[in-house]
Structure formats: structure tokens, C-alpha cells
Amino acid sequence: MTEFPKKILSRKEPEKRLLLAFKQRAGRNVSGKITVRHQGGGVKKLYRKIDFGQEKMGIPGKVAALEYDPYRTAFIALVEYQGGDKRYILAPVDLKIGDEIICAEKTDVRKGNRMQLKNVPVGTMVYNIEIEPGRGGRMARSAGNGARILAHEDKYTNLEMPSSEIRKVLSAGYASIGAVSHPEWAYAVIRKAGSSRQRGIRPSVRGTVMNPVDHPHGGGEGRTPRGMSHPKTPWGKPAMGVKTRGRKWTDKYILQRRRKKK
């Protein structure tokens, strides 16, 4: 699988009309309380508005640029449609500047095109998949990810997800052809602490070096063991060998759970 490297991304400023500035909340909820630890700082960045749905249905467009997006692991593509309107989309692997794409109920099976799942041949890789028709793509959106179509049954399509889970989704939903760009992101190595701070990741401290009032693992003289058979979170909940995924309304669509890694 080939991929365009970062160095040949378009050397242009992002489209101002498609940018948003968010106030930094750094892991805090609406009340200002920290709900996700170890977040904060980082370089300033602007959000790119991405078309995850079918806003330009039936209108062909040409890829004008391939760009970096600081808010996601994948690259994005700037598409110019007939009439001069421009939109950002998630760029698939092997998409090139000058390529033409289209979103339609049924169209050619070509990377970047978007169509209803029921019209995509079995065995095809898709990404940016709708869970509910008309609500925009929700699944398989991060770098290198894509789902494989296994079968069409009645009004459902069976998909093999990147996690190896097999689930069914409504065939009336839309998906884009191909796999998400920048798969080599999974092999990137953060070589120094400063790189993490630039990403907005703050340092984390081991529980065993804290005081007992701060963590269940804390206390003791020197390098003492944690003093319990199973590790706990800072709030005293089990932290190993317990299920953390809650029940979701989409569980009924799962045909086969993902395979455990050995």
C-alpha cells in the first residue's frame, strides 16, 4: 500500500472560510472541573470543518490540495466543486491532487467516491461510515483505518471493522471508498518530552511514588510494592482485567466480538 508522505503535502495556507477557533478547555467539563487528566498546553491550532456527510450530493469535485490537520491523525483533502464551492474531506490512501470525486447514491468504485453501502461490492474497503443514515460518517475515520464489506443481507450490510469486530449497519447509509490516509502514523515515535508537550499532553506520575492520600498505590518507604493483589485507579476502582465498555444501543448490531490480541 503506497501513501503520500508528509513532505509532499500542499504548501498552502488553509482555507480561512473553513477554519474555526476553539477556546482551550484542556480536559475540563462545562463546569471547569478536570475530567480527563494530563491534558493542557500545546501549540495553538485551528479546527478544519470537515464534510463527513453528503453535503454536495451529485456534484463532482476536483482535489485542489492535500493538507495536514492538527486535530486528527489523518490527512485531509480540499475539494473544489463545480460552482467554486470548497470543502474539506478525509483523504483516502493514494488520493492525488487533480483527482475527481463524487458523492452519489450509486457511482464508480473509486477511491474518494462516496455512495450508499448497498451499492458497494463485497470485499471493498470503506471508511467514514454512517451508523444512522443521514447523520454523517462516524466509524473508521482515523489514520490508516478502513472496514471491509463482507455481505449484504436484507436492509443491512455486514462489515469487518479495523478492530476485527464484525457488525451490521443499515445499507441505506453512506460510506467512502478506500482506507484513511497516513497509515504510517501508527509507527511514529515521540523522541523527547517536548514533543508530547507540544501535542497538549502533560506529564503523568506513577501512583507508587505518591502519598497514600493521593493514590491507593502510594506510601511506604523506598521502592515498596503497591501492597495489593490487583492495581487500582486513583479513585479505588479496579484497573486490570475488568471490562470498561458500557452497554450501548448499537450492541445489538454486533455479530462477532473482536479477537483478543495474544
Image (cartoon, grey):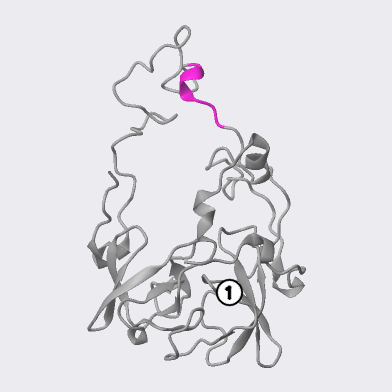
In this image, 107 relative to 248: left or right?
A: right
Front one among 35 and 53: 53
Secondary structure of the residue carrying tag 1 is: strand
Q: Which residue is mark 1?
A: 89
Q: Main secondary structure of the magenta part?
A: loop
Q: Which residues are magenta?
A: 204-211
245 to 175, vertically: above or below: above
Quarter of image, res 28: top right
Neighbor class of circle 1 (other Cα within 10 Å; few <14, some 14-19, many 20+) is: many
Quarter of image, res 107: bottom left
Any magenta on residue 78? no
Residue drawn at 56 percent across, 62 percent down: 74
Number of numbered discs overlaid on the protein picture = 1
Q: Which quadrant does the C terminus fall into?
A: top left
34 to 115, vertically: above or below: above
* x, y percent for residue 157: 29, 77
* x, y percent for residue 87: 64, 78
In this image, 58 relative to 254: left or right?
A: right
